[in-house]
Amino acid sequence: MIKLVLSDLDDTIIPFGAPRASARALKDIRALQVAGVHFAPVTGRVPAAMSWMFGDDETCYATGAFANGQVVRVDGRTVKWVAIESELLQQVVDVLDGECLNVWLALYGLTDPAHVSLVSPHPDRLLANPPDAWDGHTQCILPRVPTGSYVKANLQCSCSRQEMTKVRDLLRLRVPELGFVMPSLVARVIDVSALGWSKADAVLLIAHELGIDPTEACAFGDSENDLSMIRALPNSVAVANADESVQQAAAWHIGLSRDDAVAQAFEDILAANAEGRRPSFMSKDFNMSEALLA
């Protein structure tokens, strides 16, 4: 029986470009909770962004892993907090600046998701090549990383996907104390995380805190930043639009994010638990096309 459902948000339970989880998904999350199944979002986003993504329903994210697992909450209580020191983030800025790359470090506030600072010693170059998410009304440009500790940081890229891959690999070599992963196949963003702590560690901690065996958990994901979580749990699920590495690592496969395939899987889990069986999608014979027409 599945007792814990974990899901990435962007491009998984929430299709790219959609402002929030669908009404169907929200209804299914509440139904899972009523049935005694725990639900936890596992996302690169900060906790403050959850309100609008879940229609102001705090019960949907009282338990979850945020900022790629660097903030972990269980029943509204913070049980883990992993920060990145400013010195390491400044090393990232120095590499980007030294290579004259059109990639910019972004620092996020935990209480206001709209408060984003981009770091660049050369603001004229940034303004000439602004990233997709640039908004001069809510963002500011800093010459250096302010001294302190940070939970959420990423790289906003004004370059092609191919160049992003090269930047990611370069930073893995030049700043090996940090992790660099892509959270989306669409958005031009590279997440920066604390090395040695990932979504995998976060979901296993959530299961432990809830007294649930990892075999009783089910995780849904799509991108490179989900890969550790997908590998950590035996009941891991890739949406059809997932990165190839996630598709290969996942135990089970469902339909597209844009078709609400994750919500459909939630409904399958509910029915299976009630009937004392495994969900239909946890079968090698599961046919995604037939399921979507059902």
Image: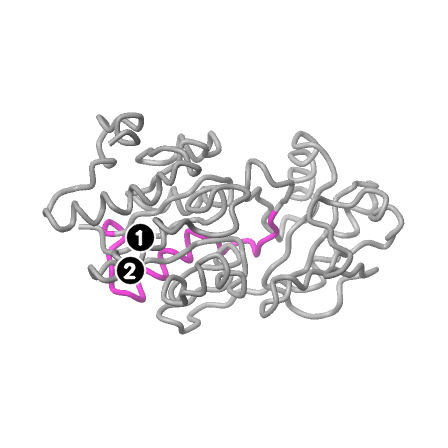
98 relative to 194, above or below: above
Q: Is residue 50 left or right of residue 172?
A: left
Q: Position of residue 249 (x, y in %)?
A: 39, 34
In the image, residue 226 lies at what x, y percent?
46, 45
Residue toward you, 134 or 82: 134
Q: Which image quadrant is residue 58 in? A: bottom left
Contact between labelled residues 2 and 1, with CB atoms less than 8 Å apart:
yes
Query: Residue 27 appears in which quarter of the rendering?
Result: bottom left
Q: Is residue 48 above or below residue 290?
A: below
Residue at mark 2 = 38
The outermost residue toward the bottom is 77
Q: Which residues are magenta?
A: 191-216
Secondary structure, mark 2, is strand
Of mark 1 and mark 2, the one earlier in the sequence is 1
Marker disc for residue 57: none
Residue at (31%, 66%) from the top-left corner?
A: 209
Left or right: where does residue 291 sit relative to residue 6?
left
* Amino acid type, callout 1: Val
Q: Secondary structure at mark 1?
A: strand
Q: Quadrant of the C terminus?
A: top left
Q: Residue at x 33, y 42 (%)?
A: 236
Q: How is the image coloured?
A: one colour
* Among the 4 quarters of the image, the one containing residue 230: top left
Q: Which mark is residue 5?
A: 1
Q: Position of residue 258 (x, y in %)?
A: 44, 37
Q: Position of residue 29 (x, y in %)?
A: 32, 55
Farthest left residue in view? 275
